[in-house]
Image: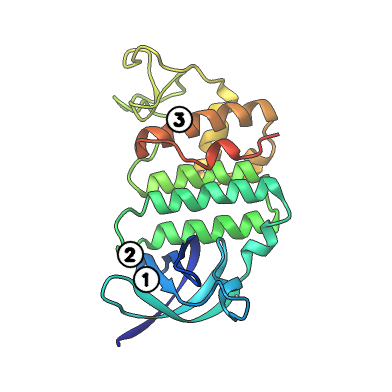
């Protein structure tokens, strides 16, 4: 059987039969892959613990008729173990994994930028570099931008008129001027809009200095923007600890 190697982040696992699992990974070169890991649910398995969600692994596969099979696994970074004792990090990280899977809908379609965003975001989360929900919201905005849905937080999303503007509309693609403002648009505070721009651009000095009120307001807008573009909400997002 033809074999190949790739490194990736484990996104999800599903039980298969009595001892096997189907592992979903986002890989560097091959995009999203689903593969069977045989015998990993047995207590004697040497690789079962390595194939848990969040873990960054180097995997060897052999090609199967419907699903490929995992033959070897080496741990690059056991990120799951670093997040497991912190509820806020774990729930925020889970939302990142679900987003990555939803935004890479085509299997075996290379998604190098999505992969790099996920790896860097999870590593930052595990290291405690920033507050977990800030990392999550920054990842959501950036991953949507990579998918082709970059929100506008300065210029009007419809006519391009320079801002600042006072209205935010999900369907329009971000901030809109008074002329283009559709009915039902939100009116976020200038501080929340500045925070959104900082999260999208990676200005962590400004993001870390933001207040809780702005963070919660910005998170609501990010969640609405994400839900609009992926057409249904994330199951994991309501579980995120934002206290």
Quadrant location of residue 192? Answer: top right
Give above or below for 167 relative to 243: above
> Considering depth in this image, is 187 or 237 the residue closer to the camera?
237
Cβ atoms at labels 2 and 1 below 8 Å apart: yes
Looking at the image, residue 195 sits to the left or right of residue 184; the answer is: right
Q: Secondary structure at mark 3?
A: helix
Q: Residue furthest left?
A: 65
Measure the alpha-carbon separation of dots 2 and 3.
27 Å
Residue at left offset 29%, top offset 57%: 106
Measure the alpha-carbon separation of dots 1 and 3.
31 Å
Residue at left offset 43%, top offset 48%: 143
Q: Quadrant of the C terminus?
A: top right
Q: Earlier in the sequence, mark 2 or mark 3?
A: 2
Q: Secondary structure at mark 2?
A: loop
Q: Secondary structure at mark 1?
A: loop
* Image location of residue 232, percent across then percent down: 39, 36
Cβ atoms at labels 2 and 3 below 8 Å apart: no
Cβ atoms at labels 1 and 3 below 8 Å apart: no
Q: Which residue was labeled with disc 2?
A: 110
Label of residue 224 in the image = 3
Callout 2: few (<14), some (14-19), or many (20+) C-alpha neighbours within 10 Å? Answer: some
Quadrant location of residue 152? Answer: top left
């Amino acid at each position: 059987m033809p074999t190949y190697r790739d490194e990736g982040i484990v996104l999800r696992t599903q039980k298969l039969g009595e001892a096997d699992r189907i592992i979903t990974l986002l890989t560097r070169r091959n995009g999203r892959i689903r593969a069977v890991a045989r015998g990993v649910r047995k207590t004697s398995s040497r690789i079962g613990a390595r194939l848990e969600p969040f873990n960054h692994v180097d995997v060897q596969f052999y090609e199967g008729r419907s699903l490929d099979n995992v033959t070897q696994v080496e741990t690059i970074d056991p990120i799951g173990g670093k997040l497991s004792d912190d509820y806020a990090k774990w729930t925020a990280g889970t939302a990142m994994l679900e987003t990555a899977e939803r935004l890479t809908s085509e299997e075996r379609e290379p998604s190098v930028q999505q992969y790099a965003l996920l790896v860097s975001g999870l590593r930052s989360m595990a290291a405690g570099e920033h507050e977990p929900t800030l990392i999550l919201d920054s990842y959501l905005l950036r991953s949507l931008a990579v998918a082709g849905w970059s929100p506008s937080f300065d210029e009007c999303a419809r006519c391009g008129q320079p801002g600042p503007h006072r209205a935010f509309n999900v369907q329009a693609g971000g901030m809109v001027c008074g002329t283009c403002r559709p009915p039902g648009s939100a009116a976020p505070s200038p501080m929340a809009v500045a925070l959104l721009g900082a999260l999208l651009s990676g200005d962590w000095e400004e993001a870390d200095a933001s207040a809780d009120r702005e963070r919660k307001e910005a998170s609501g807008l990010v969640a609405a923007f994400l839900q609009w573009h992926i057409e249904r909400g994330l199951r994991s997002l309501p579980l995120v600890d934002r206290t």
